[in-house]
């Protein structure tokens, strides 16, 4: 990890950020907190301290979002990681997505010392989503059969060492090809997001553990990105990998990289698709799933990657869960997130009022 203009930047971001984009970030913050021009200033502020990488800050804290939030009395303040956190603020909310162990210890200690501040989200809860084995654990024993659908996890195994043993482990577990290979740890690096599809036994030995091998489920080439922001649920269709038939598999061998779903520029919302493939998961199912995962994970900001098994209408699989995803790609995220932040303060106010009235 490196620092650029007082902000956390990793190696991948330094390569991705163009010079012009970096200059915009510097210019925005050289004059203070970088609020947009043209929006009225409210009398009172909800102060949200944030600790994000430059890439995350640029994609999330866009001028329109800042402007809308400011009209509602929300002020975003960049946390200086070079100074003690307790010396900054005061904050009503701390929003963060830094992966360094040192930062996790700092924010955890801060949360204990300042219970009046809402930390989004607790580091120990986020930790569950940094390991693809524990990531989907909360989905395995869910019983959502009374919610107009079924939700499961594709069959998978974890391989931690000895690539030469992978073909044997796959056969032993009874997994069927093709398999999606995913790095076990999600640590924010480019490597942790590099996925491959293996089509034959020989190619399995070329993989680099530790990793998760997940059975590929035909899903009509569509993945549902389910964004969770507190109680709010937003679903976006995106294109994914096409179905694989037996005839196709007989012609394909080897291992091929999978493009990141989040890198697809166009959504599949307006595409001319088979209605059965395009139909969003039932709302009652999503509400129950989101409620259960919020409770089990202890998180309020995450997204679920879901697929519908091809040929069915009500059989779904969760293939990934991400903490604090790319909300900048979510429709109307500015309004949704602004209302969420305001709701946090309102709930705390009601709680404090109730406690005072109890004495």
Image: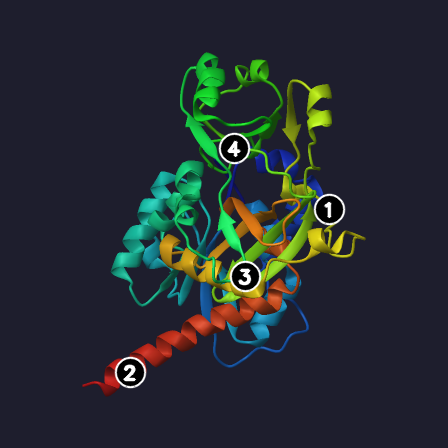
Mark 1, other Cα within 10 Å: few <14 / some 14–19 / many ≥20: few
Label 2 with label 3: CB-CB less than 8 Å: no
State the residue position of label 4.
Answer: 214
Location of residue 233 (image quadrant) = bottom right
Q: Position of residue 327 (x, y in %)?
A: 59, 55
Label 2 CA crowd tier, 10 Å (few <14, some 14–19, many 20+): few
Asked whether the residues under the numbered discs 4 and 1 touch, taking CB atoms below 8 Å apart as contact, a structural biologist would say no
The reply to whether residue 325 is visible in this rendering is: no
Alpha carbon distance from label 2 to label 4:
48 Å
Cα–Cα span, label 1 and label 2 = 47 Å
Q: Quadrant of residue 133?
A: top left
Q: Residue at x 41, y 53 (%)?
A: 142
Q: Nearer the viewer, residue 131 or 273?
A: 273
Earlier residue among tags 1 and 2:
1
- Label 3 belongs to which residue? 148
Can you tell which mark lies on residue 354? 2
Q: As displayed, is residue 245 above or below residue 268?
A: above
Measuring from the top left, give residue 106's x and y in whole percent.
32, 48
244 w.r.t. 41: above or below = above
Gap in angstroms between the C-alphas marked 2 and 3: 38 Å
Dot placed on the residue nearer the N-terminal end, 2 or 4: 4
In terms of sequence position, does the residue under pointer 1 or pointer 3 come before the other?
3
The Cα–Cα distance between marks 1 and 3, rounded to whole angstroms, is: 31 Å
The residue that disc 1 covers is 265
Q: Nearer the viewer, mark 4 or mark 1?
A: 4
Mark 3 closeness class: few <14, some 14–19, many ≥20 residues within 10 Å: some
Q: Is residue 166 visible?
A: yes
Relative to residue 246, is residue 79 drawn left or right?
Answer: left
Q: Return the residue found at the far left.
A: 359
């Amino acid at each position: 990890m490196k620092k650029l203009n007082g902000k956390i930047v990793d190696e991948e971001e330094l390569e991705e950020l163009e010079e012009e984009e970096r200059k915009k970030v510097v210019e925005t913050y050289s004059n203070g907190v970088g609020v947009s021009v043209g929006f009225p200033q409210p009398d009172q502020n909800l102060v949200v301290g944030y600790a994000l990488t430059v890439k995350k800050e640029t994609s999330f804290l866009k001028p329109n979002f800042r402007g809308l939030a400011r009209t509602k009395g929300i002020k975003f303040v960049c946390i200086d990681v070079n100074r003690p956190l307790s010396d900054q603020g005061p904050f009503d909310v701390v929003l963060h997505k830094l992966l360094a162990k040192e930062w996790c210890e700092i924010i955890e200690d801060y949360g204990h010392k300042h219970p009046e501040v809402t930390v989004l989200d607790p580091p120990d809860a986020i930790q569950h989503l940094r390991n693809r084995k524990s990531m989907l654990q909360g989905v395995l024993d869910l019983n959502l059969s009374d919610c107009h659908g079924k939700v499961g996890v594709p069959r998978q195994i974890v391989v931690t060492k000895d690539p030469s043993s992978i073909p044997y482990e796959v056969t032993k577990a009874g997994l069927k090809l093709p398999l999606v290979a995913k790095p076990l740890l999600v640590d924010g690096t480019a490597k942790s997001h590099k996925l491959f599809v293996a089509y034959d036994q020989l190619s399995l030995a070329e993989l680099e553990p530790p990793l998760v091998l997940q059975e590929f489920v035909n899903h009509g080439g569509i993945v549902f990105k389910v964004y969770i922001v507190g109680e709010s649920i937003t679903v976006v269709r995106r294109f994914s990998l096409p179905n694989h038939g037996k005839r196709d598999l007989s012609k394909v061998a080897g291992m091929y990289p999978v493009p990141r779903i989040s890198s697809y520029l166009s959504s599949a919302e307006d595409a001319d698709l088979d209605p059965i493939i395009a139909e969003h998961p039932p709302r009652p199912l999503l509400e129950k799933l989101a409620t259960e995962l919020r409770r089990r994970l202890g998180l309020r900001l995450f997204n679920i990657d879901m697929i519908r098994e091809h040929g069915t209408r009500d059989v779904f699989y969760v293939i990934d869960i991400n903490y604090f995803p790319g909300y900048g790609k979510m429709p109307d995220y500015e309004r949704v997130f602004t209302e969420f932040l305001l709701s946090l303060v309102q709930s705390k106010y009601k709680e404090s009022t109730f406690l005072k009235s109890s004495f």
